[in-house]
Image (cartoon, helix red, strand yellow):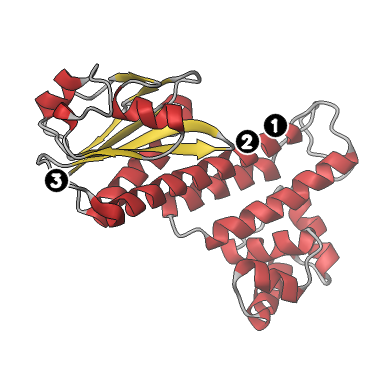
């Protein structure tokens, strides 16, 4: 079961979080296909495959209503509700669902996915439950914003005619992404952000050379700890030790320690030499 556009991990994680936060026994969801249909591709707590692969059109059923209105919708008893259309009653009945909510994931005013939570009994879900579902959808939204930004930066880094000014913006963005990754609590999202950072650092121009490596031999990469590289990325973006500490949520003294360790491993005597050595090694863009 794969979500459209690669949102699988984000949706799956959000559904588990939704169930933990609300106590709802069933959660499911999916991404939009680029138009106005969502495919239910992720299931959590379901007892049958009745909902798997179901295509929900904008305006139809509870999820379709959430897509059309770009806001959360809920019903106390799906099967008799007069506030939704009933194109999907058979699948919902097979799974035995009654009370249900649907929350759209809206990124830059466009619905990208829908998360559902449900009970097998007909009872009001309450504001607390709806709020938790909205928070789960917001987590997906933030993850998609970060992923979209990273992909845009990666594409820019691989533009054949990238100019020095554009490459400097990629470098600055690389530092920002590493700073954000350091503050992300979700381990899967943090790992994906750091993977993209690594791809940015080694993005090549035509001819196979990174712009920082043109005219200079590429060194074997030093083994820097993640925090050492975080600090060095901030320094490369022009941050002071105090600025790097603020961005990374560290003490200035801790930043100095990480920077000294990175300089030692890179054989550098100054901050600038350390950044240059990291770029030659492909650790920084």
Crowding at dot 3, Cα within 10 Å, few <14 / some 14-19 / many 20+, comes out as few
| Crowd around label 1: few <14 · some 14–19 · many ≥20 (10 Å) | few
Earlier along the polypeptide chain: callout 1 or callout 3?
Answer: 3
**Quick check: marks 2 and 1 in contact, CB under 8 Å?**
yes
**Quadrant of the image containing the N terminus:** top left
Q: What percent of the width, then of the height, locates residue 280?
A: 78, 50
Quadrant in which residue 96 is drawn: top left
Front-most of residues 79 and 33: 79
Q: Does residue 232 appear in the picture of this structure?
A: yes
Q: Is residue 197 left or right of residue 235?
A: left
Q: CA distance from mark 3 to mark 2?
A: 43 Å
Q: Position of residue 72 (x, y in %)?
A: 38, 40
Q: Real-space Cα distance between discs 2 and 1?
A: 6 Å
Residue that numbered label 2 is attached to: 151
Distance from Cα at disc 1 to Cα at disc 3: 49 Å
Name which quarter of the figure residue 36 lies in. top left
- Residue 233, image x and y in percent? 71, 59
Label 3: element kind = loop
Residue 101 located left or right of residue 109 = left
Label 2: state its secondary structure: helix
> Residue 63: x, y in percent?
33, 29
Q: Which mark is residue 155?
A: 1
Q: Which mark is residue 123?
A: 3
Q: Secondary structure at mark 1?
A: helix
């Amino acid at each position: 079961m794969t979500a459209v556009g690669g949102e699988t991990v984000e949706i799956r994680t959000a559904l588990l979080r939704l169930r933990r936060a609300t106590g709802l026994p069933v959660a499911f969801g999916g991404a939009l296909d680029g138009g106005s249909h969502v495919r239910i591709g992720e299931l959590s707590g379901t007892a049958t495959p009745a909902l798997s692969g179901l295509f929900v059109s904008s305006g139809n059923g509870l999820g379709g209503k959430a897509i059309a209105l770009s806001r959360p919708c809920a019903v106390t008893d799906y099967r008799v509700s007069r506030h939704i259309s009933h194109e999907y009653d058979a699948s919902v009945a097979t799974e035995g669902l009654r009370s249900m909510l649907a929350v759209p994931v809206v990124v830059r005013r466009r619905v990208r996915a829908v998360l559902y939570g449900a009970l097998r009994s007909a009872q009001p879900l309450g504001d607390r439950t709806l709020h938790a579902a909205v928070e789960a959808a917001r987590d997906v939204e933030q993850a998609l914003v970060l992923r979209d930004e990273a992909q845009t930066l990666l594409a820019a880094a691989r533009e054949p005619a990238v100019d020095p000014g554009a490459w400097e913006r990629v470098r600055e963005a690389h530092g920002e992404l590493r700073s954000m990754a350091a503050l992300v609590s979700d381990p899967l999202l943090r790992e994906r952000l750091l993977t993209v950072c690594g791809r940015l650092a080694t993005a090549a121009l035509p001819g196979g050379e990174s712009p920082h490596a043109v005219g200079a031999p590429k060194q074997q990469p030093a083994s820097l700890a993640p925090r050492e590289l975080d600090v060095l990325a901030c320094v490369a973006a022009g941050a002071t030790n105090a600025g790097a500490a603020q961005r990374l949520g560290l003490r200035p003294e801790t930043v100095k320690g990480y920077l000294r360790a990175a300089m030692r491993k890179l054989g550098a005597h100054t901050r600038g030499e350390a950044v240059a050595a990291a770029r030659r090694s492909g650790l920084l863009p």
